[in-house]
Image: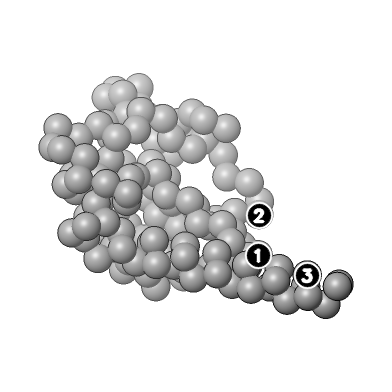
Amino acid sequence: TQGVSSAASDVYKRQHLKHVQGAPGNLPSHHIDVDLDSRLYKLIGKHPYINSRHHQAIDRVAPSLKVAARAQDLVIEALESNDSDQILAVQWHPENMYKHYRESQALFGDFIRRSAKVAAKRHHTDNQNN
């Protein structure tokens, strides 16, 4: 569901979601708080500095997912799966910051490793079926 979470609804009503930065997209504009028990924390740490260009936020989180990070205004900035390492979603744009920011590089490196793991598993399964 796209909409504003109830935790951030007062902020939205007063200010409209302030997640549109004035700086160029390849520069960070605010910090987020990452859950210490998340996979995301292992990749990018507790308070990464991220860019932001969104006017919508997550309203409700599915039971199979958990909040991995929030902005200071409580807007959800990242989700991940409770059951699998194959779902990690971020609200910001690491593709605009990967050249100069370790956190963005770590996200893409993790995505490539997870993709390779799935590809190897499928290749192994295909070879067993032939």
Q: Nearer the viewer, mark 2 or mark 3?
A: 3
What is the CA distance from the residue labelled 1 to the residue labelled 3?
Answer: 24 Å
Instruction: Give amino acid for label 1.
Output: Asp
Q: Circle 2 is placed at which residue position?
A: 64
Give whichever of discs 2 and 3 has the lower sequence position. Answer: 2
Describe the element under mark 1 as helix, strand or loop: loop
**Could you say where residue 73 lies in the image, as x and y percent from the top left?**
31, 41
What is the CA distance from the residue labelled 2 to the residue labelled 3?
Answer: 28 Å
**Could you say where residue 40 lies in the image, as x and y percent from the top left?**
42, 64
From this viewpoint, which residue is outermost toward the front? 130
**Could you say where residue 128 lies in the image, as x and y percent from the top left?**
83, 77
- Picture disc at residue 119: none
In the image, residue 126 above or below residue 15 = below
Q: Circle 3 is placed at which residue position?
A: 126
**Could you say where residue 63 lies in the image, as x and y percent from the top left?**
66, 51
Do the CB atoms of the residues marked 1 and 3 lie less than 8 Å apart? no
In the image, residue 62 above or below residue 81 = above
Describe the element under mark 2 as helix, strand or loop: loop
Give whichever of discs 2 and 1 has the lower sequence position. Answer: 2
Residue under the image location 39 percent in, 73 percent down: 42
Q: Is residue 100 left or right of residue 116?
A: left
Nearest the viewer among 85 and 70 is 85
Q: Mark 2 Cα within 10 Å, few/some/many (few <14, many 20+)?
A: few
Q: Is residue 46 visible?
A: no
Q: Circle 1 is placed at which residue position?
A: 83
Q: Mark 3 Cα within 10 Å, few/some/many (few <14, many 20+)?
A: few
Do the CB atoms of the residues marked 2 and 1 lie less than 8 Å apart? yes
Describe the element under mark 3 as helix, strand or loop: helix
Residue under the image location 49 percent in, 28 percent down: 3
Q: Nearer the viewer, mark 1 or mark 3?
A: 3
In the image, residue 82 above or below residue 96 = below
